[in-house]
Image (spheres, grey):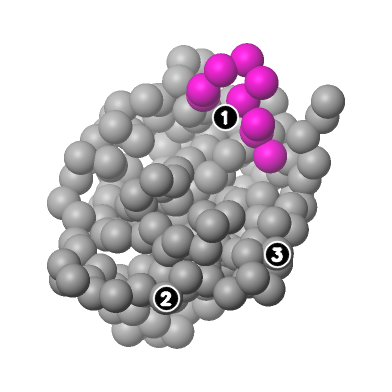
Amino acid sequence: MHPFPNIYKKHFSVFKKLNSPSKIQDFINKIPVNFEPEGETCHSPLMVLKNKKAHCMEGAVLAAACFWYHGKPPLLLDLKTIKDDDHVVALFKENGRWGAVSKTNHAVLRYRDPVFKTIRELALSYFSEYFLDSGIKTLRSYSAPFSLLQYDDDWLVSEKDIWRIPEELDSSRHFKIFSAGTRLRPADSVEIEAGKITEWKRKP
């Protein structure tokens, strides 16, 4: 793995203090949610810092860049759904176990401590949390760890939307969570209500 490019380190001096997954998550949480009022975006880490807003994909890429800054591989995990938005998190590994940093506006689908032996275990931890207001559970598959090192380093600082990353992540290898015919129980009403709790409010 080649190291984080020195030519870009000046743009990301804020990363110096973010030397643990917990600190990265705290930093990501403080960034307001990008509600995309002017249309869909996929900002680079530098543009997220400049614009001071991020949605789940942008937050995951920013967290992955921070991990890379500190010598860890920049990895993403895609959680693919039906009838709902996918969710993307940044992966990290400590003491042989997987965890995840997550940018979300809801009380669920958040940070995961590094206690999961496999990526499948980690992905399954999000299963019961991912449902519609009707209670229908929507998570169906998860990707293999997706490395951002396959791209030129420009994804860190591009002023243009980095659409190639989510597009290729979406089409990358995914694994089914359960077999056809599995009967799922809808989420309880109290779970549905709890899922409506948000951290940031959309401006009128």
Instruction: Tell me if residue 181 comes above or below residue 46 in the rendering.
Output: below
Amino acid residing under circle 1: Leu
| Residues marked 1 and 2 touching at CB (< 8 Å) | no
Query: Could one spot residue 16 in this view of the protein?
Result: no
What x and y, as percent, mark residue 119?
30, 71
Mark 1 and mark 2: span between their CA atoms? 42 Å
What x and y, as percent, mark residue 107?
67, 63
Overall secondary structure of the magenta section = loop
Query: Could one spot residue 182 in this view of the protein?
Result: yes
Report the magenta residues as a range.
33-41
Answer left or right for 183 relative to 21: left
Q: Disc 1 or 2, which lies upstream in sequence?
A: 1
Q: Residues within 10 Å of mark 3 (few under 14, many from 20)?
A: few
Label 2: which residue?
185
Q: Secondary structure at mark 3?
A: helix
Label 3: which residue?
193
Give yes or no for residue 145 being in the magenta stretch. no
Discs 1/2, front:
2
Pick the quarter of the image with the C terminus. Answer: top right
